[in-house]
Amino acid sequence: MNSFLEKLRKRNKTDYIILILLGVLVMIIAIPTKETKEEGIKKQTGTETDKTTEQDYKSQLEKQLEKLIEQMHGAGKTKVMLTFSDEGYTYLDKNLSSDEKKREEATVVYETGDGEEPYVIRKKRPQVEGVVVVAEGGDDPAVVTEISNAVMSLFHLEVHKVIVVKMSVQEE
């Protein structure tokens, strides 16, 4: 025991600093990460799935548009309804093999903890086809024009696909 204490006393400050840094390094390496095996696989393959469903996407878009229009001068309280032309598209990776007589196509899949998932190349969100805006200031032609122009520029819509009307007064 005495020989151990003598060896410790003979050490200089840099030796202690090195030992402390090694201890910190071991602790950093030992700390577990919060990433699960499934998340790691999804990040590696580049197909991390969206947490929002298409319905969530649509309602979120409506809420964002409502907040935007309510901030416009004269619009007042607002309700928005969006219609979509499709449900969006998911493009999957395919393996193609062909010879002189046959052409075969197979979807590329990868293993997850729950089974197999198709490899998604990209997703296309649903396209907005029409917008109805009900606003308190919907009786003012200047406000209607501003709201219509804003909606048309956001969604690249034609004039006849955007309707702005006055909100009825409801007694509470």
Image: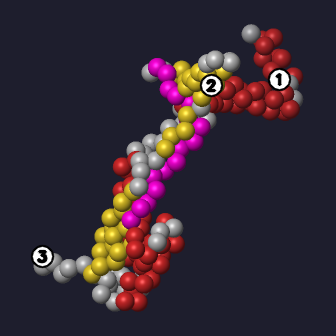
Residue 80: give its label: none
Measured Cα–Cα span from mark 3 to mark 2: 61 Å
Does the CB distance between marks 1 and 3 fall below 8 Å?
Answer: no
Q: Quadrant of the C terminus?
A: bottom left
Give SS at disc 1. Answer: helix
In the rendered view, does 107 fall on the left or right side of 137? right
Q: Earlier in the sequence, mark 3 or mark 2?
A: 2
Give SS at disc 2. Answer: strand
- What type is the residue that disc 3 sits on? Glu
Residue 11 located within the stretch drawn in magenta: no
Q: Nearer the viewer, residue 21 or 11?
A: 21
Residue 9: give its label: 1
Whether residue 84 is visible:
yes
Measured Cα–Cα span from mark 1 to mark 3: 83 Å
In the rendered view, does 101 fall on the left or right side of 39? right
- What type is the residue that disc 1 sits on? Arg
- What type is the residue that disc 2 sits on? Asn
Q: Which mark lies nearer to you, 1 or 3? A: 3
Q: Could you tell me what secondary structure mostly forms the magenta stretch?
A: strand
Residue bearing the label numbered 3: 172
Give SS at disc 3. Answer: loop
Q: Quadrant of residue 1?
A: top right
Residue bearing the label numbered 2: 95
Looking at the rendering, the stretch of residues picked out in magenta corresponds to: 115-130
Whether residue 41 is visible:
no
